[in-house]
Each structure stands twice: as C-alpha cells, then as structure tokens.
Amino acid sequence: MFLGLHFYNRGSGGGEYQQIEYVIGVSQANMRESWRLALTSEIEEEAKKYKNIRLIMTDATSDVTKQVKDVDKLIDFGIDLLIISPCDTEIMTSIISGVYHKKIPVIVMDRGVEGFDYSLFIGPDNEQIGRRAGEGVMRLLNDEKGKVLEICQSADSLPSQNRSKGFDSIISRYPDIEKSVCRIESGSKDDAEDTMLAMGEHLKEYDVIFAHNDYMALGAYLAMEKVGAEAKIVGIDGFLGENEGIDLISQGKIDETITCPTGGKEAIQYALDILKQASGVPKQVILRSHVVTKDNVEAYVEGLSEIYKKPDKIIDVGYAQVGMESAWRKANTESIKEAAKDFGMNLIFEDANQSQQKQIEAIRKFIKMGVDVIVVSPVVDSGWDEILKETKAAGIPVLASDRKIAVENDDWIMTYIGADFLEEGRRAMRWIRDNVPPDKDCMKIMELQGNEGASPTVERKQGFEEVLKDNKQYKIVHSEYGDYTIEGGRNIIKNYLESHEWDIDIIYAQNDDMAIGAIEELEKNGIAPGTDVKIVSVDGTREAFEAMIDGKLNCAVECNPLLGPQLMKAIQDLVAGKELPLRIITEEKWYDQSMAKEYLRSRKY
C-alpha cells in the first residue's frame, strides 16, 4: 500500500505536497489500437481530476505472456486496485481471479472474463452496436436491395465477432442484400485505404460500406475519393477530435457513426467508489451507444458538454411491480420502498399481480399523474411497444428493473438494472458439472421454469443450456413452467409422478420458491431431496439457505433482490441530466451446503 507517501506537485501556483492515497495499476492489452489509445487517454484525463490517486500503466503489446508478467509487476509494486483490459480472456481469467482473491479490487474493461471473480466489468454491448450499424445501413439503402462491404478487424477479435453477429442479425432479414467481407488486421486507416485502393474499380460496385471503426471508415473514404466511388459509409467509435468519427460526420466524409464509449472515465469514478467502500457499486456496467448522423451531430456534441445539477425537487417515481409471487419479490419490493424513503423520493407503487394488462394500466395512470420517472418490472418481456410510445410522447423516461423488456427501439428504455440471468443459468449448470459427476450414461435433469416469456425464464434456460451442450452425459428430460411459485414447483413434481416412475437425478429450479415446493412434494412421496435427487435453484433466499443446512437443497445461485439503492441512484442521476448505462448488473455469487450455515446470518432476504 502507498498510503501516506507524498509526491511533489509542481502546479502553476507553486509547489505543494499532495498526499497519494491510492495507487491504481492499469494493464492495457495494447496501446496500438486507436480505441485503446482513446481508453488510455480517457483514464488519464479523468485521473487528473483527483489529486489523491496515482496511475501506473503497462502495455502488453497484445502479448498475453507479457500481460501476465505486467500484472505480477503491478502487484509487486503494491497497487490498491487493478484496471485491466485483457489480451486473451481465457488465459487472463485465472490471473484476474488470483488478483481478486488477494483482496485487490479488479475492474475489467471491454472484454469479459468467465465467471464473476472481479469487482466490476465496464464495457460496450458490441452486438447491439453491430445491430445499430445494420439498421443504419438499411436506412441508407431505404430498406431496399444493395451491395454492402463490411470491413472487419481480426477474426480473433471478440468485439469484431460480436459486431458482425449483431450486424448480420439485421442484414439477414433482407434477402436482396449482397454482403462481402474484408478484414484489416491492424484496424488502421492506412491499411484500410491501401486495401480499398487495391480493389480498384470493384470498389464502385458497393452501395454502402460498414467499417468496424471510424479510422477504417476514413481509409475507405479516402480510397473511394481516389477511384471515384460513391458508397455511403457507416463507422463505429464516434470519438471527438480532428478526423475522428464526429468530425468525419460534420465534414460529410461518413454518413453515420455508432458511438462505442471506452468507459475510461467511469473506470476511475467507480475505482474510487470501490476503494472508499461506497455502497451500491454494481457488478457490470454496460455502456450506452448512440447513432450520430449529420442530422443530430450538433445536438449530440452539445449534449456532451451539459452541466449536471442535482434535482431541487422531490422526484415522483411510478413503479409497476410484477406481483408478489415469491419471497425474492417481497424482499425486492421492500428494498425499493426503503431506498425511495432514503433518497427522499415520492414512490407511487402498483402491484400488477402477474398481469401485463394491469401493468399497462398502471403506466397509463402514471402518465396521467405526470410522474418524473416510471419503473417497470415486467411480467413478460414483449408486448410493450405501444405503451412505451405513450411514455415517450409524454416525455417520461422508463427504467426496467430486475426483468428486461424487448423493444422495437432501444432508446425507449433508459437502462436495465438487475441480474445477469444468462450467467445465473451458466453457474447452475457449472455447479452440476463440477459437483454431480455422472455415474451412468445419462444423468436426467428436470427443469422447473418460471413465467413463460419472462426474461429471467428465457435467459436462465439459455445460459444453462450453453454449458449443458458441452456436457453430453447430462440431459434435460422434463421441463415445465411453475410460474416462480411454491405451488408451481409442487405441481410439477406431482404431475410428473402421476405419469412416471421417479427417474430424475437432478432438479434445476429457476427460483427458490419452486425448489421449496418441489422439496415438499418429493418428501410426501418418500423421495429424499438433496440425496436421492440433487437440487440446484436460483435466488439465494433465507429459505434456500435453511434448506441447504437441512441437506434438502444442494446449491443456490444468487440473484440479488436488493436493487433499491442502485435504482434510486440511477433515477437521481437521470433526473439530474446524466446519461445512464445501457445495463447495470448487480453483484451475485453461488452457495452450496458447505457454505450455508456461515452465510445465513448475513442474509438480508
């Protein structure tokens, strides 16, 4: 630790001693790519605002072996926190986990690692950025046929892969689009220009060029200018500065850019929160991107310089809760109500009792009341477009809490605050893989799903099956909806036993209440839960911990319901004029019988 060290500060007003409280190590994958240079610059600029921190930066030069050594050197130097953009996520996962378990906070940037052994992840949603680029290309083609050239970076680049995936998900809807792909390994302007020039007259065949960064977009423009081609251009990054994306839009050299924020500023801000042990620090922050064109470029730039002011009025918040289907939901509701009081907000709360129609009616009520913000925990993730058009027309922002909403326009939802349901499903199956070894050719799994169509249901299943597909000795042989209730879990077991001899090895319940119901029904039928059949559930309520202590539940994957403080902080920031991230993901863990007694006392739900 470097607490108490003094560094001489030669400011314009003369020398003065500044106390360095925190030393932050920054391990960059490389300082060659333009995006990473922008990230480095943003980290440095934000750090200059705080006289009590010192940065130590390393450049791995895209060499994972060097990055491992860089991290070791930073640890030896005594850093208080590590910010890292990993070269290779597979190799660096264990290194980052090792740092984290040494009680050194770790902020992972841009490229996610497996599991949750870090303090915070900050990065963009590259798949969504790709989708937005696809939508931009189709706008430029007026949703008609045309030839499109996609200029990618390295095939090994995960951001590039995800951008292509998102782009293709849009372009593939249009059968008359003919797409070609060109790779520029370096991602540089000069290499893009040279490659495009080498195409000669063939460059004139394309109607739109989509480049994975604005530097390659500029290279394509310069090449087109030389050969007389006239394709429209869509880029990615949207940085400020001469010949950066925003300037290229203003000059008319490219037609659209999709902003890809680096998160450097947020990394320093959250680093200080973590070091000061501030409450409400999320586990993941997924940054928001914007579409910038010649029509909105001036407004976009003006918005970047807005001064944020803390609201000087009581904020009215309308909350449409899904219902009270579980102990988890009760804890979630109590957290929201308590946080609203703590933040001095006026909360108007409506319980929809599992009805989407009641939630829509509640939102219309909030619109008539003229609330400042509306929050929805949706019964299902689809069917919201019409009511969200009404909130948009009324000028009332909407946040999604705990469950996601699938919308026609991403800008209709200001942010999502809640869990990573995909990761919860993955964790459940990983625990099964690691702790329930197969003792026969096929280990039979019964899946208890929640509400049909709800995002936790869909994504927990998807995440579980992602890991399941690589473990062929396990198989889901029965799956049924239990609506996240004790009765639902009880009925699934009852119905199965009425038509089958009991032959299930593992039960995967998408929440604790269904698991509790299943346990009760199993015991009624002489089947020992936790022994005769292994049971894994999601939520991590006190009831689940008690069931683990009793040996009836084997593992609980945590889904934190205490979202109130983060939600109210986001609302406060939003009303003050700050831009919210696309998604704010809470911190969560998993627990099994070996840990249950130790952690039960600390459970707040």
Image: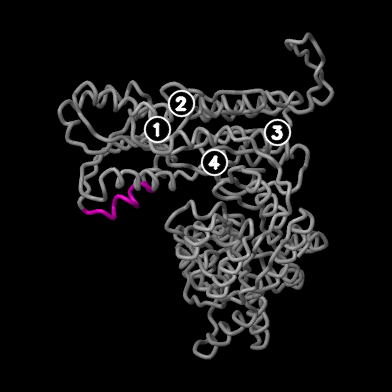
Which stretch did the figure color magenta? 165-175
Check disc 3 and report the residue beneath it: 81
Q: Earlier in the sequence, mark 4 or mark 2?
A: 2
Front residue of 293 and 507: 293
Q: Position of residue 445 (x, y in %)?
A: 52, 72
Disc 3 residue type (three-letter): Leu
Check disc 2 and report the residue beneath it: 34
- Please, what secondary structure does the residue beneath circle 4 have? strand
The coloring applied to the image is one colour
Q: CA distance from mark 3 to mark 1?
A: 30 Å
Magenta stretch: residue 174 in it? yes
Q: For residue 353, which quarter of the picture?
A: bottom right
Q: Earlier in the sequence, mark 1 or mark 2?
A: 2
Disc 2 residue type (three-letter): Ser
Left or right: where 10 falls relative to 467? right
Disc 1 residue type (three-letter): Asn
